[in-house]
Image (cartoon, rainbow, N blue to C red):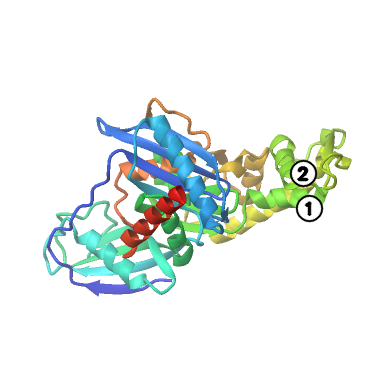
């Protein structure tokens, strides 16, 4: 879907928005919540501390129990503050719920022979974002994809160049507004301000892609518990994004149903013995699986490890096929076609081989690039690390900021509610 607008831009300077110190980020997922705190030092980010907690009250990245979700957020932020020895007031929040998706639009800027000013691109992005707003939808990101001047070759930075018409192809990432505002309200009721909201697959790519991969082209699959994020990068920018409402939790549910086992037992079996690779020896390896029944003496069944693969592989194949149908692989340059897997689902045995078979691309497991500082536990914090990289750098676009008109009123209500709970 594409549209074109011709606008006359003001020449005034846009007001710069600063980001508070220390920098704090919050990744709210379906199964876990992660908070990282960092500070700027000598032009880089140093990690001060972080926290991980099981997420409660969320399904497919959306809040289904506000009280439980708030408790999870408070717990993980407190853990990170204790580790860092700092108190935070605002956060950059990563979201996977609300079905984020891409929209491409084009804005033409009438210059009248003058030079491109320092704020022209930002004003054009704001115009594209405003034009795309509809009821029930928020625009998370407005990112320039290609910029041309009077039909010339694509430009990396048009500022200072003279011409008559500046054309900007803008990549908009939009999300359903109700799940987004429910999440923002939960964070604000924890007495925290939301500085910006970033799509989780975008953050996962920022954390795990090398500079060459982001420039030449790569697809990031963020295999979360409740959702699977798909993000295509090229020319150093996010080009396409989508989210699927299936994830690793669906594999756990399939195991629980197929083995007549409890969910906790199914998760344990998936973690310890789960695989998508069919191996001859798996039919001889026997596993004891407690069934559903009397908690004191649950029935026990004996199943071959190969049975787990028979249940897991079809669901993993379905997730990859759905992801492949949502991304345009033909737009990836031949020299840069590769796949990077992140998220908890990427730890499943054989998942890289299955991804290469399904997509026909070389694949690898993506890990967060290290920061400086004393805290270095980024094993399960790829998306949170990407949020930090976004917060510490300028991606050249506009990102949704929580500017809800009732924020102060919501915060006052939260403080009153807390006082009532503590005193009555």
Mark identifier at residue 257: 1
Residue extending farthest top: 374
Local SS, label 2: helix
Task: Give the residue displayed 41% in from the left and 38% down from the top.
Answer: 36
Q: Quadrant of residue 175 in the image?
A: bottom left
Could you tell me residue 410's position as x and y percent?
37, 60
Mark identifier at residue 359: none
Q: Is residue 198 visible?
A: no
Mark 2 burial class by Cα count in 10 Å: few <14, some 14-19, many 20+: many
Q: Is residue 272 left or right of residue 242?
A: right
Task: Give the residue displayed 24% in from the left and 73% down from the top.
Answer: 6
Picture layout, residue 311 above or below residue 175: above
Mark 1 burial class by Cα count in 10 Å: few <14, some 14-19, many 20+: some
Residue closer to the observer: 408 or 367: 408
Could you tell me residue 386's position as x and y percent?
42, 43
Residue closer to the observer: 377 or 51: 51
Q: Nearer the viewer, mark 2 or mark 1?
A: 1
Picture layout, residue 5 above or below residue 282: below
Closer to the chain start, of discs 2 and 1, is 1
Local SS, label 1: helix
Q: Is residue 249 left or right of residue 231?
A: right
Disc 2 + disc 1, Cβ < 8 Å? no
Q: Which residue is mark 2?
A: 309
Task: Give the residue displayed 52% in from the left and 51% down from the top.
Answer: 69
Task: Give the residue displayed 66% in from the left and 40% down from the top.
Answer: 348
Q: Is residue 262 visible?
A: yes
Q: Is residue 82 left or right of residue 152?
A: right
Picture layout, residue 34 above or below residue 106: above
Quadrant housing the N terminus: bottom left
Could you tell me residue 170's position as x and y percent?
34, 62
């Amino acid at each position: 879907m594409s549209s074109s607008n011709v606008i006359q831009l003001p020449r005034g300077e846009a007001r710069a928005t600063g980001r508070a110190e220390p920098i704090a980020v919050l990744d709210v997922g379906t199964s876990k919540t992660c908070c990282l705190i960092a500070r700027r030092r000598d032009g880089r980010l140093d990690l001060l501390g972080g926290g991980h907690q099981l997420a409660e009250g969320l399904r497919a990245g959306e809040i289904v129990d506000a009280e439980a979700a708030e408790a999870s957020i408070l717990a993980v932020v407190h853990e990170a503050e204790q580790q860092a020895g700092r108190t935070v007031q605002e956060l950059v929040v990563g979201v996977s719920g609300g079905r984020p998706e891409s929209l491409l639009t084009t804005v033409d800027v009438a210059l009248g022979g003058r030079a491109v000013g320092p704020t022209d691109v930002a004003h054009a992005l704001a115009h594209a974002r405003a034009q795309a707003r509809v009821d029930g939808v928020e625009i998370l990101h407005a990112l320039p994809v290609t910029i041309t001047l009077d039909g010339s070759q694509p430009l990396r930075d048009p500022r200072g160049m003279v011409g008559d018409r500046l054309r900007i192809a803008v990549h908009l990432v939009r999300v359903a507004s109700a799940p987004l505002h429910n999440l923002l309200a939960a964070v604000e009721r924890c007495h925290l301000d939301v500085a910006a909201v970033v799509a989780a697959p975008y953050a996962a790519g920022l954390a795990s892609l090398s500079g060459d991969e982001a420039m030449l082209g790569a697809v990031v699959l963020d295999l979360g518990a409740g959702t699977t994020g798909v993000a295509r990068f090229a020319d150093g920018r996010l080009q396409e994004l989508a989210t699927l409402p299936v994830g690793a939790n669906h594999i756990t549910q399939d195991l629980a149903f197929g083995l007549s086992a409890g969910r906790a037992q199914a998760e344990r079996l998936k973690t310890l013995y789960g695989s998508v690779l069919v191996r001859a020896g798996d039919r001889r390896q026997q596993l004891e699986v407690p069934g559903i029944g009397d908690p004191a003496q649950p029935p026990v069944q004996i199943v071959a490890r190969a049975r787990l693969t028979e249940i897991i592989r079809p669901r993993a194949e379905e997730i990859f096929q759905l992801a492949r149908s949502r991304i345009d692989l033909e737009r990836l340059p031949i020299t840069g076609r590769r796949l990077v897997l992140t998220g908890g689902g990427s730890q499943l045995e054989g998942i890289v081989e299955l991804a290469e078979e399904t997509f026909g691309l070389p694949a690898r497991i993506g890990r967060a690039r290290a920061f400086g500082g004393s805290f270095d536990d980024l094993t399960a914090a790829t998306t949170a690390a990407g949020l930090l990289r976004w917060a510490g750098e300028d991606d050249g676009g506009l990102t949704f900021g929580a500017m809800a008109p009732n924020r102060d009123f919501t915060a006052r209500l939260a403080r009153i509610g807390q006082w009532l709970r503590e005193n009555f």
